[in-house]
Image (tube, rainbow, N blue to C red):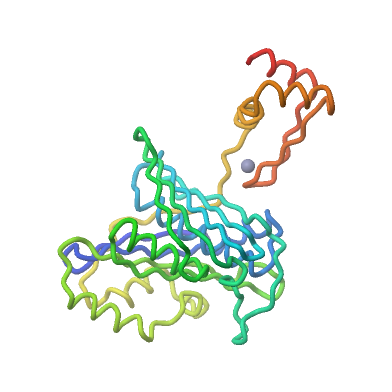
Amino acid sequence: MKDYCLRATAANGKIRAFAASSKFLADKAAAMHKTTPVATAALGRLLTAAAIMGLMSGNEDDLITISIKGDGPISGVLATSDGRGRVKGYANNPQVDIPNKPNGKLDVGRAVGMGNITVIKDLRLKEPYVGKLELISGEIAEDVAGYFAISEQIPSILSLGVLVDRDQTVKQAGGFLIQLMPGYDEDLIDKLEAKMQDFPAITTLLEEGKTPENVLEMLLGEFGYEITETADIEYYCNCDKDRVTGAIISIGKDELVKIIEEDGKAEINCHFCDKQYHFDKDELVKMLHSL
Ligand code: ZN
């Protein structure tokens, strides 16, 4: 079993849609970062959104980063994706522990709090595109949909969900995105809004055994749709010693001299996968000489 994302078109090209199952990547992120259930949900939702946006951009080398910063106890969540469906991310405070909502659901909105969402699209042009706006609820799906509507002027319906099991592993995760393309009419908006009124949560559908294909059929069946792409999505960190070396060199000569004199070595943990990189004195001195 693998995570994957479908891309579809409907209503004669007036609708663009995506549906994803992301249980394995959300679970890998949770295990790697040792997240509490509410942090697992926040990170899993954002990773799913990033995977969808990475596939949307279409080019393999594009990099999409979504950063959410808030005044809640999780402090921030970040996810990044390339155009091949490879995502990675982290929560600033993976150990955040707050009570569930009165209805028993994980309170992602309270964990995140009030703040901003920033989307950085590095499409390998001169300057990356950066969109930043205030969070709507901190529940993530609403905030990313707000980004599309305001920064990109694309009316969007986004649903993201992560169901955490009793043993704290991820039982279900996934999401769908429906976007209206230029030339849509009000009638289409009315029909979609009516449909969303009583549409089940994505995790409820996945828990019933529904696939992303089934979800698209439920969403778009009446609009005449076609699946145009099926892509694997996965949690993948591309860190290696060269990249980490680059990061150490970038701190500058003075800092590097200080580390060599005071510690004589450096231990660096990758934010995204927690892999540890060790540098001994000789390696650090070599870096210094390369400056
Ligand atoms: Zn890494």
Residue 159 placement (x, y as % from top left): 43, 71
Horizontal and vertical percent for residue 63?
Answer: 44, 43
Please tell me whether residue 251 is drawn above or below residue 62 in the rendered image: above
Quadrant housing the C terminus: top right
Q: Position of residue 169 (x, y in %)?
A: 66, 67
Q: Residue at x 66, y 29 (%)?
A: 248
Tell me the quarter of the picture where residue 257 sits: top right
The one nearer the camera, 63 or 251, is: 251
Looking at the image, the residue that sits furthest to the top is 289
Indicate the quadrant where residue 156 lies.
bottom left
181 relative to 271 in the view: left or right: left
Image position of 184 with respect to 208: above or below: above
The structure residue drawn at horizontal position 50% and vertical position 59%, both measured from the top left corner, is 116
In the image, residue 51 above or below residue 62? below
Q: Which of 46/228 is in front? A: 46
Query: How many numbered discs sit on the rendered protein?
Result: 0
Q: Ligand 1: which quarter?
A: top right
Residue at 83%, 25% in the rendered image: 264
Q: Quadrant of residue 244?
A: top right
Is residue 230 or residue 200 the one in the foreground? Answer: 200
Q: Residue at x 17, y 78 (%)?
A: 187
Q: Is residue 249 left or right of residue 139?
A: right
- Drawn side of residue 116 relative to residue 218, left or right: right
Judged left or right of residue 57, residue 9 is left
Q: Position of residue 160 (x, y in %)?
A: 47, 69
